[in-house]
Amino acid sequence: MSGQPSGDHTPVLVTRISTEADVFALRRDAKIITQAVGLHSRDQVRLATALSELSRDLLRPAAMTAAFSVQRQPAALQALLQWRDDREPSRESLTAVTRLLPQTHYESASDAPEHPLPAIRPRGGRIEITCLIPGSAAQDLDVDQVSALLRSDSPASAIDDLQAQSRDLIAALQEAHAQRDELERLNEELTETNAGVMALYAELTVEHKDVVERFGQEHELALALQRTFLPDALPRAPGVELAVRYLPAASTTEIGGDFYEAVDTPHGLLLAVGDVVGHSLQAAMVMGELRHALRAYACQGHPPHILLQHLDHLLGLHQPGWTATLCIVLIEPANDRLHVANAGHLPPLLLAPDGAPRYLNEHGPLLGLGLPHPVAVSHPIKPGSRLLMVTDGLIETRDSGLDDRLKMLGAAVAAGPEGPDELCSELVTAFGADPVDDIIVFAARFHPPDIRSALPAPRSPV
């Protein structure tokens, strides 16, 4: 990344805002900068719109400052509005911007730290917005070129500014309509599936109760129903090998809540493993609702910890009293960095080709408790690294502590085969004999995205 950094940030532009013309110029500058640093087109429109609306809301004769800078680790574009008086944004504009861009932080004049001498206590407020830059774009980013593009931009007329803003609003409306249609389609699919499953289960339970109890057909029905809620295939992503195994508990006729997901998102490949607390048909129904909702929210491009917040709210709203664990890992398109957000689940295991196994121990509260979730933590990925995500049925036993079993699992992965499919098979054989709880083993191996033809197709669960 070129440019002369200052600390962890490299400045790109600092400008003063005191007139309506300055607001339009800020919107133009934001579009140029966001496009130059490689943000997704949706984030370009969102950031430009957010800065425009906030600046207009905060516009006063006394100038405020707008500044853009590029953060190096993790790669991100930061926009900062700052003023030195007691003006405050309206609740409506700040709420709308935070909904569009969750990484928005507002600090009012009253939040400033007290100074020992009241006469020189700092006044003013600030709004900071951060947008992650995709890994592939960050590698080729030249801040000097971004500054050159800003200098070469010719002044625009008021008509040009209004037309550009109208085009952005139309694009945002089209995106919102497309997301609404996708959510409606997924909701209809989930509703139809739930209705069919409940009808089938009720029919077999009422009409054939004696036969089910005598010959164990309820167990087979439970397994069939549970599999309908799990993905039937894994996506193919450039440079990523995936494999998964799902084993139902051997000694119960009730349905568990273990689930997994893999889905392409606007910011990379998302992998997830979770477990609804409990064993029953209702637990499986809650699991199915969470998985469908995760896919829908992921398509909107939210970062992992925001996905957890949305799912926590959904669970508390529609399934009060239920809780679930869920670990989400987002792989950037360059396969050189991942982001982890974990809601009370077992930590994922990352193994570099030249290093020891390392558990990524970032943790937050379970879903369904209504508690805040910490920001996702990023980790670099070396070519050839492997990732393992499991449910507790693989390692929990009555005669061994969880920490000891996690160490045994890490050692088995380090000594095991490098291929995800072979690794899943070996771990199931070593740890999954006659399981008392459902087991999910989800493995991945990462290469640069240009390695395509040599990679095998993803392996679905057995």
Image: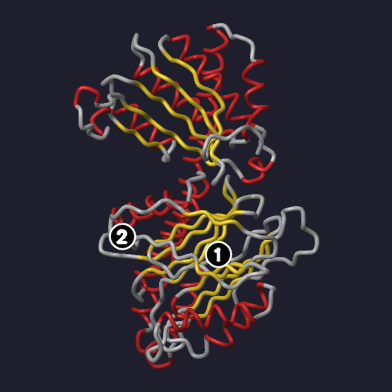
Residue 386: x %, y % from top left:
63, 68
Q: Earlier in the sequence, mark 2 or mark 1?
A: 1
Of the numbered discs in the image, which one, if any, rests on residue 231?
A: 1
Please identify the quadrant where the C terminus is shown.
bottom right
User: In the current view of this chain or complex, which residue is farthest to the front?
Assistant: 117
Please identify the quadrant where the N terminus is shown.
top right
Quarter of image, res 112: top left
Q: Is residue 141 left or right of residue 395?
A: right
Residue 361 or residue 102, whichever sits in front: 361
Residue 386 or residue 270, whichever sits in front: 386
Is 74 situated above or below 5? below
Residue 216: x %, y % from top left:
43, 89
Of the numbered discs in the image, which one, if any, rests on residue 17?
A: none
**Label 1 CA crowd tier, 10 Å (few <14, some 14–19, many 20+):** some
**Label 2 CA crowd tier, 10 Å (few <14, some 14–19, many 20+):** many
- Numbered disc 1: secondary structure: loop
Residue 105: x %, y % from top left:
37, 36
Q: Is residue 148 left or right of residue 20?
A: right
Residue 215: x %, y % from top left:
43, 92
Residue 323 or residue 105, whichever sits in front: 105
Using the numbered discs, state the Cα–Cα distance from disc 2 to disc 1 in whole angstroms.
23 Å
| Amino acid type shown at disc 1 | Pro
Depth-wise, is mark 2 or mark 1 nearer the camera? 2
| Amino acid type shown at disc 2 | Gly
- For mark 2, what is the residue? 368
Residue visible at 26% across and 21% down? 86
